[in-house]
Amino acid sequence: MAEPFPAEGLPLEEARSLVLAALMPLSGVETVPLAAALGRVSAAPVLACEAVPGFRASIMDGYAIADVAVPEPGAVWPLVGRSAAGAPFGRALAEGEAIRILTGAPLPEGAQRVLPQELVERIDGAQAPAHPGEALAAGLDSGGAAPTEAKTAAAASPDLASQEPATIRLARPAGPNPWIRAAEEEAAAGAELLAAGVRLGPAELGRLASCGVAALSVRQQPRIALLISGDELVAAGAPRGPGQIWESNGTLLEALLQRLGARVTERRVVSDQPDFLRQALVELADGCDVVVSTGGVSAGDTDWIRQLAAELGEVAFWKLFLKPGRPFAWGRIGGTPFFGLPGNPVAAAITALQLLWPALQRLEGAEPLPLPRLKVRLEAALKRNPGRPELARARLVLDGDGGLWARLEGSQASSRIGSLQGADLLLEIPAELGALEAGTELWAQLLRLGIF
């Protein structure tokens, strides 16, 4: 019977669509504190329980006044009090009055605007400059004489004289900006702070905390089982026999998944023996939500994984029309999704990014987001033959004019993990292109993770 997939392999986009169409989010939900929520996916919308900050606040250090219209330079007001963060002025502000106010402090009822302190002077001699150095300069008389000690202290800290009756005067034009933060600047009561299905980063968590949210419900993370197969594998640090290699795929893939916010709950290295591999696949599928293998999915004499997966469940397709990453299997073991990654480490990492990572996002209830793409130019010529589409590893380089260039360093062999070191980009090279000249423009996937 003919295989239900093309002999040359499925194009990447078609393979991704088939995988995602076969998956539904896991049903589990748990409530966690914000400190444990980084990287998790929200299970339900989160609404603001009240307005935040909940009061009008000053954006500047300065003086609050009740004037509705923009005052003209020379206007004066008696100073009747002070408002600081956590220590508001205790009554409404009347027309013609002013209070000293600090950044973030509540505005009293009646206050209409804040005059930044660098625009205002105390006409009793205690000015309100922006910096202490300006206070010293302002205190010099026309002959350059130093101010009295009392005037210097008052100028450097206008609140030192706040116990004495004082008057302020607008010394410079104020402009139309009232310098007031609205009571609902961050959120109105009942506003949606967070939708369901959002992967939580520092910005989301910080905003939730600022709105009084201490815990929230998140989706279940897929439990990932990682199976590494190969008779030739020995643990890193152990002596190698003839033809043996140190096992690296497990470390590479687990670290990659951890960087992406996923978690490997079990990891096994198994020799290329059908009975051992069959038992491992059954046990891992029973105890986890996703089984991921690396190695054993090609067509060699000891490549048993694909055959065993078909025996224990189904293989929906095998092989990708992609370089690196042609040997790839997707299906189920029992009812558990199964991803058979290539054995070469770079090919395993690339196919994990392109197919496994979107699938894990879907299982966790998030919308699978592709890696961001941008156009870059090759810094140097690249030798290649037409054949399969290729994802080449490259560094992102900026020239003096802000142009984006891709720098390829060393061999692009799928067995060479060094090609992943420092890689910022996966260059998308179409199948039909052969040798590429320096300056050739290509699309590239950006590998750098978002910060917020």
Image: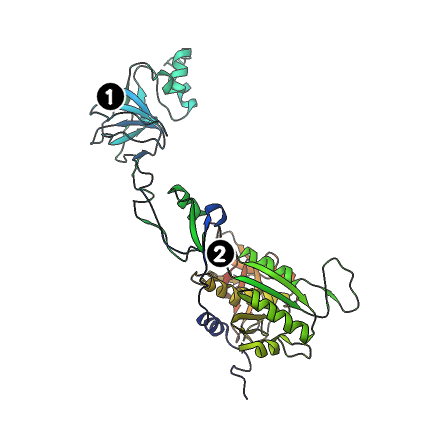
Query: Residue pushed farthest bottom?
Result: 1
Q: Which amino acid does label 2 sit on?
A: Gly
Q: Is residue 449 visible?
A: yes
Q: Is mark 1 on a helix, strand or loop?
A: strand
Which residue in the protein does label 2 denote?
Answer: 403
Q: Nearer the viewer, residue 298 or 289?
A: 289
Residue 194, percent from left and from top: 37, 52
Which residue in the protein does label 1 denote?
Answer: 76
CB-based contact (under 8 Å), mark 2 and mark 1: no
Q: Nearer the viewer, residue 7 or 271?
A: 271
Q: Image height check: is 429 above or below 45?
A: below
Of tags 2 and 1, the one toward the viewer is 1
Residue 76 relative to residue 362: left or right: left
Q: Image height check: is 102 above or below 160?
A: below
Q: Nearer the viewer, residue 447 or 242?
A: 242
Q: In which quarter of the image is residue 180?
A: top left
**Mark pair 2, 1: CA separation:** 55 Å
Q: Image height check: is 222 above or below 432?
A: above
Q: Label 2 neighbourhood size at 10 Å, few (<14), some (14-19), many (20+)?
A: few
Res. 277 mark: none
Residue 343, percent from left and from top: 64, 70
Residue 63 relative to residue 377: left or right: left
Residue 74 relative to residue 304: left or right: left
Residue 381, percent from left and from top: 58, 66
Residue 179, percent from left and from top: 30, 34
Q: Nearer the viewer, residue 120 or 196?
A: 196
Q: Can residue 324 be seen in this view?
A: no
Mark 2 or mark 1, earlier in chain: 1
